[in-house]
Image (tube, rainbow, N blue to C red):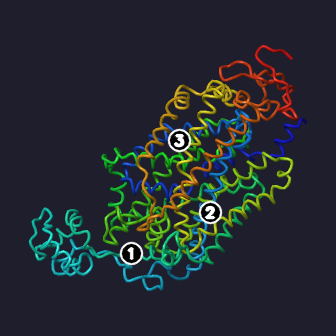
Amino acid sequence: MGEVEEEVIERGNWGSKADFLLSCIGFAVGLGNVWRFPYLAYSDGGATFLIPYIIMLILAGLPLFYMELALGQFASEGPITVWKVSPIFTGIGFAMVWISATVSIYYNVIITWAIYYMFVSFVSLDDKLPWQTCNNTFNTEKCRIEPYPDVLSMNESFAEKAIWGEMFKRNCVADRIAWENITTPYNLTNVAEINSTISVSKEFKKGFADCKFEYKTSSEEYFNNFVLRMDQSVGLEDVGMVSVKNVLTLLVAWLLIFACLMKGVKSSGKVVYFTATFPYIVLVILLVRGVTLPGYMKGIEFYVIPKVEKLADFTVWGHAATQIFYSLGPGFGGLMTMSSYNKFKNNCYVDAVVVAVINCSTSIFAGFAIFSLLGFMAERTNQDIENVVDQGTGLAFIAYPEGIAQLPAAPVFAFLFFFMLLTLGLDSQFAMMETVISAFTDMFPGKLRKHKVLFTLFCCTVGFIAGIPLVTEGGIYVFNLFNSYTGSYQLILVSLAELVAIMYVYGINNFCKDIEMMIGYPPNIYWKAMWFVITPGVIVFIVISFAYGHVRLTYGTYTYPDWGEAVGWLFVAIPLIMMVVTAIYMVFKMGLRDALRPLPTWGPAMPEDKIGRYAAVNYGYDNEGGDLPFTVVNGKEPVNPEDVKPHYINEKL
C-alpha cells in the first residue's frame, strides 16, 4: 500500500455510519440544550427568543455546519492540517483548538456538578434528597418548601392572614400607599381595601414588588451554599479555598473522559449509542411531571407568548446567534474532526440537515420541560417568572432539582436526571477533547499516534489542573468568566474567517465541485447564496450587535472588576492573535501567492478517491477554475511538499 493509505488506516475511522451520526447528535445536543438555551430564552422574553433563534439557524448555523462537515470529510484532516487548502489560514485551526481546549476546561466542571448530584441522589435512595427540606445546615430563614397559598380559594378571613403573613409586608404596603401615593389601578387609600383578588393581580404585584416576602427554594440554597460554597467568597478578588469534594469529583470526571477517549473514535463511537439517546427518555418524564405541578401554565405562557418589542433589541439577536454557534458547534473544530473519520462517499449533506434539526428541536422541547418547572417555582416562591433564577447554571442545578423534589421516589428521578446531564455533557466533551488530541496527532503523526493513549492522558491531566480554580469557593465567578468569554465572540469571528478562506480564497465553485465528488451532486442555490453572501453578512451583523449590546459582566449581584473583564477579553483575543500571527508566518515562509494556494497534498486522502482534477497526474486548479502551481503524481503525497517544483498554467511535466 502507499504511504497515504497507511496513514489513514493508522489514523482510524468510524466503525459505522451510526457511530458518526450519533456522535454528531451527541456533540450538538449537549448541556446547552437543557441549560444554556432555556436560560437565554428565559432572559430574552421566552417565545421572542425562538424567532431570532430559528432565523439564525437558517441563515448562519446550518450553512456553517454543512461547510465544516464537508471540508473535514473531503480531506480526512483535522482542524489544523485541513488548511492545506490555503496555508495562510492555518491559524484558524489553531484558534479552533484553543477554543475547544478552553471550553473543555469549564464544560467538564458542569459535568463534575452533574456527577456530584448523581452521587448524592444515589446515596439518598433510601431517604429524602438534601434539598427536599429546609432544616439543613445550609438553609437560611428564607427557605420555603410549602406550597404557596391559593388565596382565591380561601374565605377572606384566611386569605387576609395569608396575604399579610406569607405574601406581603403589611407595614411596607401601608407606608407606600400613604407616603408614595402608589395606588395601582384600584385607587387604594389604605391596606384594609386589599382583598384576595387585588393581592394576586399583576398590577398590585408590580406596584408593591418591594414589599413582598422573599423566599428561596431549598434547591437554590443547596447549590449556592453547599455545593459551590459561594457564600464563603466575595468574588474574583478572593476565590477562597479549594472545595475538596468538588476537586475529587473533577478528577473523576477527567478520568471518565480519558477512559472513553483512550482508544479514539473506536471507543467513543460506541459509548454514544447510549449517551446520545438516553436523555430524551428523561426529558419526556420531566415534561410530564412538570405540567402536573401548580403554576406550570405561567411558565409555559411565558415561553410560548412572544414579546414583540424584544425583537428590536440587538442583544436578543446576538444571544440567538451565540446559542446557535455554541450548540451546533461551528468554530470549535469538532465537526471537522468527527467528519474527518468518515468514508469519502458519506452523504454529509443529509447528516448536516438531520443533526441540525434534531438539535434545535431538542432545545425547543427541553424549553417546555424547564419552563413548566419555572412556573411552579414562581408559584412557590411568590415571584414573577422573570425573577425566579439569577443565572443560567441555576436552571440545571436549581429549577430542575426543585421540580424533581416534587416527584414520588424523588431520589430515583434525581439520579436519572443527573445521569442524563452526565451523558449530555460527555458527548460534547468527547468531541472537543478529540479535536484537541487529533489536531496534534495529525500534526505529528510519527511521534504521537503510536503513543496516543499517553498523549490523551497528558491532555486530560492538563485539563484537570486548569480546572481546579473553577472548583474553589469562588470558582463560580471564574466559571462564569470562562462561560461568557471562551465560547462566544471568537466562535463567530473564526467562522467568518472560515467563510472567507473557503468561499473567496479557495473558491466557492471549487468547494462545490469537491462536495459533488463526495455525494454525487453539487450544493443547490440556497447553500451557495448562504455561503457566499448571506451568512458572511449575518455574521458581520452579529459582531455589530455584540459591540452595541455589550454590558459589563455580572453574576447575580456581583459585578466583575476591570481586571476580570480584561482577562475575559484576553480569552477572546488569543484565537484572533493566533490567526494573524500564523498568517504572517506563512506569508514570510512561503510568499503571499503560495500561502493562499493549496499545497500539493491537498485533496482526498485515499488514492482511490483521487479522481477528476485530483487524478494520478494532476495540475490542480485555482479559485477561478484554472491550474494550480503544483503537480501530484500517482495519487501520493510528496515526502517534502515544499521541495516539489512548481508547475504553472499550461506547463507540462
- For image coordinates 79% across by 35% down, the residue present is 605
Q: Which image quarter holds the N terminus?
A: top right
Q: Which label is found at residue 108? A: 2
SS at badge 1: loop
Residue 229 image offset from top left, x and y in percent: 52, 77
- CB atoms at circles 1 and 3 under 8 Å apart? no
Q: Nearer the viewer, residue 309 or 9?
A: 309
Mark 2 Cα shell of 10 Å, populated few (<14), some (14-19), many (≥20): many
Q: Give the residue pinned by disc 3.
A: 61
Q: Which label is found at residue 377? A: none
User: In the picture shown, does residue 27 fall above or below 214?
Assistant: above
Q: Which image quarter holds the C terminus?
A: top right
User: In the picture shown, does residue 586 fall above or below 207?
Assistant: above
User: In the picture shown, does residue 258 fall above or below 3?
Assistant: below
Mark 1 Cα shell of 10 Å, populated few (<14), some (14-19), many (≥20): many
Residue type at tag 3: Gly
Q: Is residue 603 visible?
A: no
Q: Give the residue pinned by disc 1.
A: 216
Specify which label sits upstream in the sequence, 1 or 3.
3
- For image coordinates 58% across by 50% down, the residue present is 573
- CB atoms at circles 3 and 2 under 8 Å apart? no
